[in-house]
Image (tube, rainbow, N blue to C red):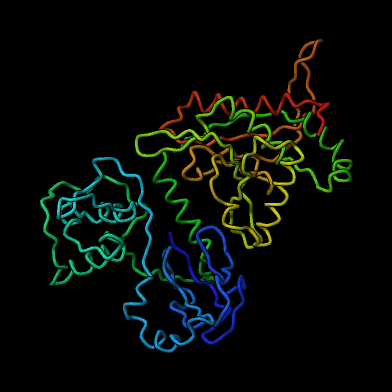
Amino acid sequence: MEATILKWHKKPGDKVELDETVLDIATDKVDSEVPSTAEGTIAEILFKENDVVPIGKVIARITTDGDTSNTSSEAQNPSEPEHEDAHIVEEVPYQPEEKKAVNNGGSGIRFYSPLVLNIASSEGISMSELENIEGTGQDGRVSKKDIMAYLENRKSPGQQKPRETSQSSQVPNVPATTSRHQYAPTVFTGNVEIIEMDRMRKMIAQHMIDSQNTSAHVTSFAECDVTTMVLWREKVKKDFEKREGEKITFTPLFVEALVKCIKKYPLINSSVDGDKIVIKKDINIGMATAMPNGNLIVPVIKNADQLNLTGLTRQVNGLANAARNNQLKPDDTSNGTFTLTNVGTFGSIMGTPLINQPQVAILAVGAIKKRPVVIETEQGDSIAIRHMMYLSLSYDHRIIDGAFGSTFLNAVAKELENFDPKKSY
């Protein structure tokens, strides 16, 4: 929907080649370089660094050999009609019938984005009030800027000019994504250090709050004996690296087991759209990856069900390395349908992860620990040292009940426990 301009590599008057990097931008997931779409001279830069720009907005103009004569006049008069190609293209979200409002002319539908509805709901703005707000977005839609300006004007004399409307219904009951209370500045005493959140940490914080406000979180746990899998990996890892040029970790083995179980229980690979359940036929496994700066990102293994173990290993290693070196592309973090997080990487034996929206479940695998456990043998029960691990599955209780969630979780545990010791790769 929008991106933040991080850095301009060019300034007005600079020459630029086709596909040469002009600027760096940041979305809520990754940072990207933006290449030039033409060869020529930078005539005008319309946004500064750190500006947040909607999709479809013109951010700079390049003059080519054919239009150099217009450079100076365009730069001096950026508001003239010929520059009105800088329009905003907004994504129209799914809205049930009861969330649609007829515009003042009665000739069509006036859409409201979830963000606008959230603000309206949290601020107690009725649908009739919302209809009164003049929209500056595409097709007269009310943007965040419009509704925030309306709230400011409502606090002081002289509100925005109302729109004619016959609507009297209330704003749909959409939960607010965040609290909008104003807090007094905190006064700290003692020896403290205050660290400003970076952009990605702010995005992660918002995403986590949104997830909690969207899904009814429930977490189930299972214990898993992965001794056979651990011993198999220990036996083949040197030969695997020599033959394939890749180190095999436990992650591709976990993903392989997950894929098999998702095929048996496809409801776990879905999302919620209003009152509809969208079951995804593609199996795209996100893997939560810690970055060197402490932030978290979730690159996605696309079509994981179509990859063998070697292919999964290459994907896991490639995406993990790209994440740690800040080299992920926007497509690398999109369209995930189920997420795996390895909380055991840093020593945790279990965790209660938050669902990665709009997915409905996330699996956490804990640290593998040697423990004495009771096992059944032909001679009867005995105590043996085994490699044990806890699994935890957080799922959206709106559509995944405890019975189904626990059944899926135990299916994953059994898949790992029944690992083939003679497995080929």
From the image, which quarter does the C terminus lie in?
top right
Q: Residue at x 69, y 47 (%)?
A: 345
Q: Residue at x 68, y 29 (%)?
A: 224
- On the image, the x and y values in percent for residue 275 come to 35, 35
Q: Residue at x 30, y 46 (%)?
A: 174
From the image, which quarter does the N terminus lie in?
bottom left
Left or right of residue 269, residue 169 in this image: left
- On the image, the x and y values in percent for residue 152 come to 23, 68
- On the image, the x and y values in percent for residue 96 come to 29, 40
Q: Nearer the viewer, residue 415 or 308?
A: 308
- From the viewer's perspective, is residue 405 above or below residue 337? above
Q: Nearer the viewer, residue 28 or 220?
A: 28
- From the viewer's perspective, is residue 117 above or below residue 222? below
- On the image, the x and y values in percent for residue 108 come to 21, 50
- From the viewer's perspective, is residue 48 above or below residue 95? below
Q: Residue at x 73, y 21 (%)?
A: 374
Left or right of residue 327, residue 122 in this image: left
